Image: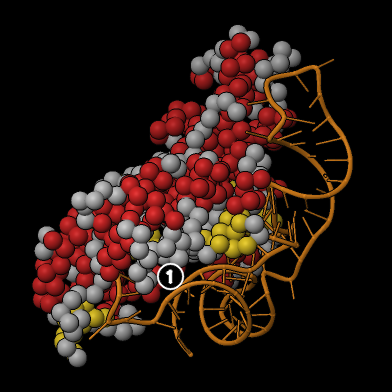
RNA sequence: GCCCUUGUAGCUCAGUGGAUAGAGCGUCGGUUUCCUAAACCGUGCGUCGCAAGUUCGAUUCUUGCCAAGGGCGCCA
């Protein structure tokens, strides 16, 4: 990589200027403003104090050395502002990027390797199996599935998992609600009021356990809804099966031998506060029943069989849960940091100018199905993935519906479709793209052409950053930027007309192909279709 | 009271320890005998919530305050 070559040269230069230990803060970065060159280093600013010179002076001396260092593609050096050294490169270095994209293709370009050898278990959605998935829950589906794709691209082996809470009070109430509706009685206190309960009750055969039948019905519904936006799971884990297997008792044994269990007020407590929790937690109540926490501990322990790292994606209302589970996993013998929780902020849904409160129990529902039916899977997923999971999201359904043909998803997809249109038109006109070896990329000098290449160059860093920071929305941002650069290029740089120089035409055809590769990679990571026609 | 997240353009949101803070939508104007106008180009726009600290440099990090949302059960 050219960046590391430049960084090495900077380090060498600093050493010969008397900086023995080059600080970590010395970096080589792409300046935001293209007028500041292609790469830039803050070396003189960071090191000036160490050698007792002012930044401009040190910068000048460093620049003199770098000019003699003969770094490939470097055309010119500038010192600017408080002491930045800017590297202006010949376009040839970006042409190398084009060759790299083409050589490596969709499968191998922008595929970091730092995750190799590590498996990651990602649990997400895991909504209560007592009804359809509401539109807020779709956010976790889109997020989790895309994160898995991104991690996979970085070499990790992701394992996507859905936990079915198919025992406990809620399931009993749900079963009772179904029975009540089926027999024409009132739904019990605290039961489920939604219209779907009546609909499902009508489907329910007479000779079944209502709770278990209802759960299976709900899970089928949730699974199909999520598949409707291309979200799938590798494992659907049953809480009931886990409890029946004796895993809970085994977990208690392990916790007991870890020495963090004690009895108080007739209950059994887990001393999670020694690992950062606010207070200790009850795991077995005075009446002998265990709390929800205990099966959860057993389950999270079990997930380590399917991942070196275990990630939960949880809604903001669960954030208080994280410290107790972190502590519990340490007690269960898992290294600190191998359990990780991503807290996503909630989704607000607005329809007809008013917020719709989502609750299965009261029956106020906008099912994710409904959203997908209105907007289509691509728009729905893109909408969920367009902003950071740390921000509360407001989805105004009327607005998205109205803008269904005029939104960022189509903008990006249109770029991809345009590329295929170019190929089709080239075929029609008998224009053949020659082997890349024989094509002179030096003809690509237009600022829009180079801008496309700069974006392609960024992709590997963007993918790596999205994986490390668990931030799929960075891919969304990148893909929009690449599409914008491509549309500008397309408008400014004709490709197929007869008056285009054949050399340039060939180079542009390859640039178009490289863009196609970039868009395909990005859209695939988001789980959004890359259409050939629009 | 304590904990988590957020506070950036009219709206919805990106972004960054640096050099003039960005995009979409909305406004107004322009571009098609030529590869998809679902596009492009131009136009306006900001005390980056407030205050202090760290730093050569803070919108970005730390602390306090203010505001919004979400949590603080022997519920799950």
- Mark yes or no: residue A395 visible: yes
Label 1 SS: helix
Residue A276 on image: x %, y %: 32, 79
Q: Residue at x 58, y 19 (%)?
A: A423
User: Where is residue A305 drawn, in percent x and y?
Assistant: 19, 55
Instruction: Tell whether A329 sits left or right of A44.
Output: left
In the displayed structure image, the side of residue A346 where residue A431 appears, left or right: right
Residue at x 64%, y 57% (from the top left corner) = A352
- Splitting the image into 4 quarters, where does residue A191 fall? bottom left
Q: Position of residue A121 (x, y in %)?
A: 29, 54
Quarter of the image for the C terminus of chain A: give it.
top right
Q: Residue at x 39, y 51 (%)?
A: A199
Name the side, left or right, on which A500 lies relative to A412.
right
User: Measured along the vertical axis of the image, is residue A418 above or below residue A521?
Assistant: above
Nearer-the-camera pick, A183 or A188: A183
Q: Which residue is mark 1?
A: A317
Camera sees residue A310: no
- Front residue of A362/A164: it is A362
């Amino acid at each position: 990589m050219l960046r590391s070559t430049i960084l090495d040269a900077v380090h060498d230069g600093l050493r010969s200027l008397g900086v023995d230990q080059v600080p970590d803060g010395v970096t080589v970065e792409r300046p935001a403003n293209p007028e500041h060159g292609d790469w830039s280093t803050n070396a003189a600013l960071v090191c000036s104090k160490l050698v007792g010179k002012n930044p401009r002076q040190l910068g000048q001396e460093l620049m003199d050395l770098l000019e003699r260092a003969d770094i490939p593609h470097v055309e010119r050096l500038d010192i600017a502002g408080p002491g930045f050294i800017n590297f202006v490169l010949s376009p040839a270095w970006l042409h190398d990027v084009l060759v790299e994209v083409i050589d490596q293709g969709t499968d191998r370009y922008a595929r970091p390797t730092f995750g190799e050898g590590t498996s990651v278990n990602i649990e997400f959605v895991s909504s209560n199996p007592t009804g359809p998935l509401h539109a807020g829950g779709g956010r976790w589906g889109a997020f989790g599935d895309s994160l898995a794709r991104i991690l996979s691209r970085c070499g990790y082996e992701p394992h996507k998992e859905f936990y079915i809470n198919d025992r406990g009070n809620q399931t009993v109430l749900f079963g009772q609600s179904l029975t009540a509706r089926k027999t024409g009685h009132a739904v019990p206190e605290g039961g489920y009021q939604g219209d779907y309960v009546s609909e499902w009750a009508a489907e329910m055969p007479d000779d079944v356990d209502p709770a278990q039948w209802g759960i299976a019905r709900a899970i089928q519904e949730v699974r199909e809804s999520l598949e409707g936006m291309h979200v799938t799971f590798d494992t659907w884990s049953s809480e009931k099966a886990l409890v029946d297997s004796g895993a809970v008792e085994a977990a208690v044994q392990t916790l007991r031998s870890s020495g963090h269990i004690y009895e108080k007020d007739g209950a059994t407590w887990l001393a999670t506060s020694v690992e950062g929790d606010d207070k200790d937690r009850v795991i077995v109540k005075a009446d002998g029943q265990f709390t929800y926490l205990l099966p959860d501990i057993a389950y999270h322990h079990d997930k380590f069989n399917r991942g070196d790292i275990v990630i939960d994606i949880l809604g903001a209302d669960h954030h208080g849960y994280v410290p107790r589970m972190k502590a519990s996993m340490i007690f269960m013998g898992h290294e600190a940091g191998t359990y990780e929780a991503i807290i996503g902020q909630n989704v607000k849904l607005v329809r007809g100018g008013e917020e719709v409160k989502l609750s299965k129990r009261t029956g106020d529902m906008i099912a994710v199905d409904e959203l997908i039916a209105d907007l289509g899977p691509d728009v729905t997923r893109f909408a969920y993935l367009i902003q950071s999971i740390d921000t509360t999201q407001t989805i105004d359904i009327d607005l998205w519906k109205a803008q269904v043909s005029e939104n960022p998803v189509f903008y990006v997809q249109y770029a991809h479709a345009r590329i295929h249109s170019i190929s089709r038109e080239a075929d029609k006109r008998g224009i053949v793209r020659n082997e890349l070896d024989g094509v002179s990329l030096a003809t690509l000098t237009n600022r829009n052409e180079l801008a496309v290449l700069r974006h392609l160059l960024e992709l590997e860093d963007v993918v790596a950053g999205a994986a490390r920071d668990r931030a799929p929305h960075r891919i969304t941002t990148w893909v929009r930027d690449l599409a914008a650069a491509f549309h500008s290029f397309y408008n400014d740089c004709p490709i197929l007309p007869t008056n285009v120089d054949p050399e340039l035409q060939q180079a542009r055809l390859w640039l178009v192909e490289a863009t196609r590769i970039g868009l395909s990679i990005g859209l695939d990571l988001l789980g959004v279709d890359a259409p050939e026609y629009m």
